[in-house]
Amino acid sequence: MNLQFFAKAVEYDEAIGGNLIRASFREDLDDDPFNSKKKHLVISQLYEFPDDASLQWYDGESGGHYSGSEVSSYKLTEQLFELKMTNNVTFTIQHRGLKKVLAQIRHFLQNELGTGQ
């Protein structure tokens, strides 16, 4: 699977005093995050548990909600986010995220996934 889309919403959120971190790339600003009908990728980490960061995504098709955690590589630039998982799922997401938000996401990804490309 190769999920490609343009993210109108690029967000970085912290909750529970920084114990929960979430980075998201969403195709639609107004899409309901709990009942999404548009393509998106969310990477999150709950530091209360020692697990790897988790990924959830929706491919834009009915029944297309997925999740996983095994990332093999990623690259984040000012206009593109590419991520490859060990099961050959890839993401190519064009965006126009704010520099401050991208810096927060980059720091989060480096802590959780390593340096990237």
Image (cartoon, helix red, strand yellow):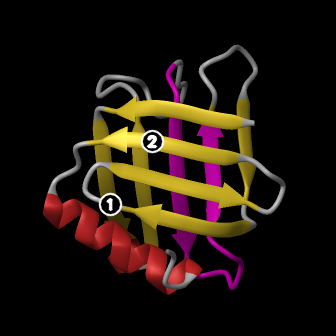
> Which residue type does callout 1 highlight?
Thr
| Label 2: element kind | strand
> Which residue type does callout 2 highlight?
Ile
Give the residue pinned by disc 2.
Answer: 93
Query: Is 92 placed above or below 68 here?
Result: above
Task: State left or right for residue 100 relative to residue 34.
Answer: left
Front-most of 62 and 8?
A: 8
Q: Residue at x 69, y 85 (%)?
A: 50
Q: Residue at x 73, y 48 (%)?
A: 67
| Residue 103 location (% of width, % of height) | 25, 71
Q: Residue at x 36, y 72 (%)?
A: 106
| Residue 62 location (% of width, % of height) | 71, 14
Front-most of 52 and 117?
A: 117
Query: Is 6 placed above or below 83 here?
Result: above
Query: Is residue 66 located in the magenta-colored stretch of the structure?
Result: no
Q: Tell which circle, 1 or 2, labels the residue nearer the N-terminal end.
A: 1
Tell me, yes or no, whether the two marked residues, 1 and 2, touch with CB atoms within 8 Å: no
Task: Using the rendered image of the protein, determine whether residue 71 is visible from the camera's viewpoint.
Answer: yes
Query: Is 117 placed above or below 6 here?
Result: below
Q: Quadrant of the N terminus?
A: top right
CA distance separating discs 1 and 2? 10 Å
Residue interval drawn in magenta:
38-57
Q: Specify the farthest residue to the right.
A: 87
Q: Quadrant of residue 18?
A: bottom left
Give the residue pinned by disc 1.
Answer: 77
| Label 1: element kind | loop
Task: Using the rendered image of the protein, determine whether residue 47 is visible from the camera's viewpoint.
Answer: no
